[in-house]
Amino acid sequence: LRLVPVPVGSLLSSYGWYILLAGVAIYLLIQKISQSLAARPSRQPGAADAAVEPDVVVRRQEALAAARLRMQEELNAQAERYKEKQRQLEEEKRRQKIAMWESMQEGKSYKGNLKVNQQEVESGASTSSAVPKSKPNKKPLRGGG
């Protein structure tokens, strides 16, 4: 009785020693890798990083501080632009009220003059930004009680 078929037997007889040496080499390689992984300390963020490499932690904190400072400066610049835009809108409203008051003092209809002024403002504002329209004061339909 044959335990090994002929093609496998001829393969083992031709390359048996090579197969055996390759198996031993793979086994030793696996052992070496497992020992190096076991010897390496597991990296946990937090206190272990500070104890091992404090200069890396300091550089990271400085980078974070610089990024926060840049973001704060951008936010301050945006706030300044917004305030300037609001001041310009308030100035334009003030000019419209003065023009309306002067036209009322002269006895002219201030509504027609206001529409002309608003058209001029809208044509000028279309290039920069939209001017919010003021809603007329309406009395509520029901009483407050």
Image (cartoon, rainbow, N blue to C red):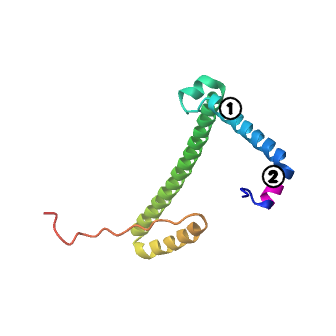
Q: Name the residue located 41 percent from the left edge and 64 percent from the top edge.
A: 101
* Tag of residue 120: none
**Range of the magenta residues?**
7-12
Q: Quadrant of the N terminus?
A: bottom right
Identify the main secondary structure in magenta. Answer: helix
Pick the residue in front: 101 or 119: 119
**Residue 108 appearing in the image:** no
Q: Which SS class for mark 2?
A: helix
Residue under pointer 2? 12
Q: Which SS class for mark 1?
A: helix
| Mark with earlier residue (1, 2) | 2
Q: Quadrant of residue 40?
A: top right
In percent of width and height, residue 56 lies at: 65, 29
Q: Name the residue located 55 percent from the left edge and 46 percent from the top edge.
A: 75
Asked whether, in this view, residue 67 is left or right of residue 93, the answer is right
Specify the farthest residue to the right. Answer: 14
Q: Is the residue marked by circle 2 packed among few (<14), some (14-19), or many (20+) residues within 10 Å?
A: some
In percent of width and height, residue 141 lies at: 20, 72
**Any magenta on residue 144?**
no
The amino acid pointed to by label 1 is Ser
Pick the residue in front: 43 or 102: 43
For residue 96, above or below residue 73: below
Q: Name the residue located 54 percent from the left edge and 51 percent from the top edge.
A: 84
Q: Quadrant of the C terminus?
A: bottom left
The amino acid pointed to by label 2 is Leu
**Any magenta on residue 8?**
yes
Residue under pointer 1? 36
Pick the residue in front: 75 or 48: 48
Report the label total. Answer: 2
